[in-house]
Image (cartoon, rainbow, N blue to C red):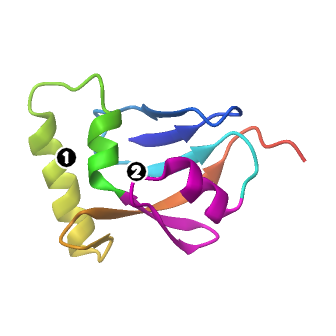
Amino acid sequence: MIVVIDDTDNVTLASPNDFREFHIECHKKRSSSEICEILGQGSKVIDEEHLWLSAEMVTNLASEKIDGWENGFNQMLDYATSKGWTENNRELIRAHIEWARVEK
């Protein structure tokens, strides 16, 4: 699962059925605060390379879910929780930020 923010601030979820990968991909260089503002919905800055993302936002972005998607997502949250990557009773998920095609 990759939360993608394109050059025009559109937010989509790529690979919504891949529960082994989770991060934010930005197509334009932004600060973590700017990314947090774009994502909204309870997102919070951890540092310049990580955010807390709303699990509800991720669920809402997942438009093409396979059968058993909720089970896979819950297993992903279980794993993230075991690593300390969730907060507020699994309402928030820690995600790192990657930049793709960033112009300088």
Neighbor class of circle 1 (other Cα within 10 Å; few <14, some 14-19, many 20+) is many
Q: Is residue 32 magenta?
A: yes
Task: Tell me how many marks there are.
Answer: 2
Q: Which residue is mark 2?
A: 22
Taking depth in this image into account, of 37 and 19 the one nearest to the observer is: 37
Residue 63 found in image quarter: top left
Which of the marked residues, 1 or 2, is nearer the chain's N terminus?
Answer: 2
| Residue 96 appears left or right of 20 | right
Q: Which residue is mark 1?
A: 73
**Do the residues under discs 1 and 2 have CB atoms within 8 angstroms?**
no
Res. 18 visible in picture: yes
Residue 28 found in image quarter: top right
Q: Secondary structure at mark 2?
A: loop
Task: Where is residue 11? Give x, y as percent.
Answer: 52, 36
Residue 103 found in image quarter: top right
Q: What residue type is disc 1 on?
A: Phe
Res. 97 visible in picture: no
Q: How far apart are labels 1 and 2 at the CA level?
A: 11 Å
Q: Residue at x 33, y 44 (%)?
A: 58
Q: What residue type is disc 2 on?
A: Phe
Q: Is residue 97 above or below residue 64?
A: below
Locate the N terminus by quadrant.
top left
Magenta part of the chain: 31-53
Q: Secondary structure at mark 1?
A: helix
Task: Where is residue 98? Give x, y as percent.
Answer: 61, 52
| Residue 92 appears left or right of 104 | left
Q: Is residue 35 magenta?
A: yes
Q: Residue at x 34, y 46 (%)?
A: 57
Task: Where is residue 89? Give x, y as percent.
Answer: 18, 71
Task: Where is residue 14? Give x, y as percent.
Answer: 44, 31
